[in-house]
Amino acid sequence: MFKSVPNLQTKEQYAYTTLRDAIIRCELAPGEKLVIDHLSTEMGLSQIPIRTALQRLQSEGLVIINPHAGAIVAPLPSEKIAEVFALLESLERTAFTIAAQNRTDADLIDLANILDQMDAVLSNPDPSDWLVLNCAFHRRIATITAMPLLIDFTARTLDEWMRISHHYFANITSTRLPQTQAEHRQIIDLLRARDTDALESLAAAHNRDANRSYQALLNKTES
């Protein structure tokens, strides 16, 4: 699963980024036990950088370390879907409003470029590229606010959204994606117009509709 250490990364950074990516993509599944000896052999590293990486991932809520039972990937119950979208709604109501006040023309160009890339990969059988770009789009809006806590909370919540998407819906293409793209374009238009009231309403609708779509897909897969 794991590649050799790139020349420009320290062993600790390599262990952290590699394990983190595997957890976000659910290549290391929720609840999976993380055996340090096994990871050390697989990654060609000593145990020290792996222990450090697991401690960093624990601080991000992606790993749980029990002193007596070892480390596991943080579980991902289906109830977390509603929690994630509720958090995103709250965060983005603030982010969209502040970003509308702060945004520059360069910010709007960056967002439009990300959206063009999302359009280009929309028809791919593997949705991974679209998921990554969707996170990039929403994180880019958060950065416009220049609010470090909001940026951090948004990134962590989007990480959980990525895990949910890979864990529950890896082989499902949502019929809502064209609507989602249309809403993304509307977000850019409203940021350009600095229409904060409409942006707040759209933040709510965007996340509530997404939650309903995910819940419907989950019910379909469980039936």
Image (spheres, helix red, strand yellow):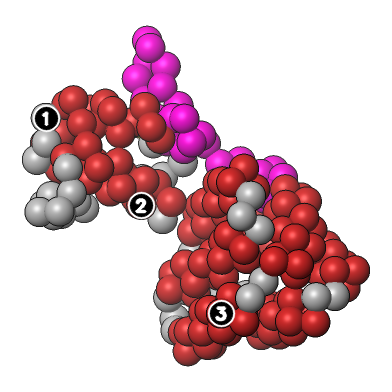
Residue type at tag 1: Ser
Local crowd size for mark 1, using a 10 Å CA cut-off: few (<14), some (14–19), many (≥20): some
Q: Secondary structure at mark 3?
A: helix
Q: Is residue 177 above or below residue 65?
A: below
Q: Which residue is mark 2?
A: 21
Q: Nearer the viewer, mark 1 or mark 3?
A: 3
Q: Answer whether residue 181 is visible to the viewer in this image.
A: yes
Q: Residue furthest top?
A: 68
In front: 100, or 222?
Answer: 100
Image disc number at residue 46: 1
Image: magenta residue range? 58-85
Which quadrant does the C terminus fall into? bottom right
Question: Residue, x 74% and y 76% (percent of image)?
Answer: 191
Q: Is residue 87 above or below residue 169?
A: above
Question: Residue, x 26% and y 26% (percent of image)?
Answer: 51
127 sits to left or right of 181: left
User: Is 62 covered by the magenta stretch?
Assistant: yes
Q: CA distance from mark 1 to mark 3?
A: 44 Å
44 sits to left or right of 14: left
Q: Answer whether residue 221 is visible to the viewer in this image.
A: no
Q: Which residue is mark 3?
A: 106
Local crowd size for mark 3, using a 10 Å CA cut-off: few (<14), some (14–19), many (≥20): few
Question: Residue, x 30% and y 47% (percent of image)?
Answer: 17
Residue type at tag 3: Ala
